[in-house]
Amino acid sequence: MSIRRDFFENATELLTQLPRGAFLSVRANGTANTMTIGWGMMGFIWRKPILMVMVRFSRHTYGLMEASDTFTVSFPSSDGYKEMLAQAGKLSGRDMDKFRDLHIPIQEAQTVDGPVIDNCGLIIECRTLYKQAMNPNDLDEEIRTNFYADDDYHMLYYGEVLACYHNDK
C-alpha cells in the first residue's frame, strides 16, 4: 500500500468530513481517550505526508498527547456516529471512559499503539514529528477575539501519516 498516495487520494473526503467532526484518539500510560475535532490541516512537509491536529491545553487529551508520540484520527463516513461525536466533544475523559460509557466501538490501530473507531470510515494513523504551542501575540486579533476569548489556546501536533485506510468496507 502506498500511504502517501492513499492519504492524498482521500483529501476531499478528509477535508469535507473534518468540519463535521472526527475522532482524535490517543493512548498513553495505559489510558486511552478520544475527543471530537473539527479543525486541522493536511499537507506535505519534510518529504512526508502530514496531518496537523489541534488540542486545547485544557483538554484531557492534551496530557495524553504529550505523553504519547502517536495518535489516530477516525473520520466517520456515515451519520451513524453523529451523536457519539457530539457527546465525545462535550464530555471529558477525565470523568469517564468515553469508549465504554458512550458505547464507541474501537479496534486497535494497524501501525501505532492506540485505538481507532471501529467500522467508522477513513482512518489516519500518525506519529508526532513536531508540536508547536500557539503564541497569542502572533494571532490575528479577530481570530483571538472569536475563538480564544477565554485564553484557552491550542497545541498544534504535526503527525507523519503512517497509515491511511478505510475500515468500513
Image (tube, grey):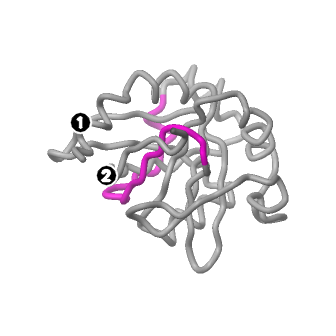
Dot 1 lies on which element?
helix
Q: What residue type is labelled 2?
A: Glu
Q: Residue 150 carries which label?
A: none
Query: What residue lies at 45% left-to-right and 47% top-to-bottom?
Result: 156
- Separation of disc 1 and disc 2 at Cα? 14 Å
User: Which residue is farthest left?
Assistant: 47
Residue 151 appears left or right of 53: right
Name the residue nearer the viewer: 12 or 142: 12
Q: Residue 7 falls in which quadrant of the image? A: top left
In the image, 60 versus 23, the foreground residue is: 23
Image position, residue 139 (x, y; %): 48, 31
Looking at the image, which residue sits at the far front? 169
**Pointer 1 residue:** 5
- Tell me which residue sits at (84%, 59%) in the image: 101
Mark nearer the N terminus (1 vs 2): 1
Kindly report the secondary structure that dominates the magenta region of the rendered protein: strand
Q: What element carries label 2?
A: strand
Q: Position of residue 168 (x, y in %)?
A: 55, 40
Which disc is residue 160 wearing? 2
Tell me what residue is drawn at x 21 percent, y 46 percent.
48
What residue type is disc 1 on? Arg
Q: Which residue is drawn at 55% across and 26% down?
A: 17
Q: Is residue 108 above or below residue 143?
A: below
Magenta stretch containing residue 79, yes or no? no
Left or right, 96 with reference to 73: right
Looking at the rendered structure, the number of numbered marks drawn on it comes to 2
Q: In this view, does 148 lie above or below 1?
A: above
Residue 131 percent location from the top left of the image: 39, 55
Magenta stretch in the rendered image: 119-139
Taking depth in this image into account, of 82 and 57 the one nearest to the observer is 82
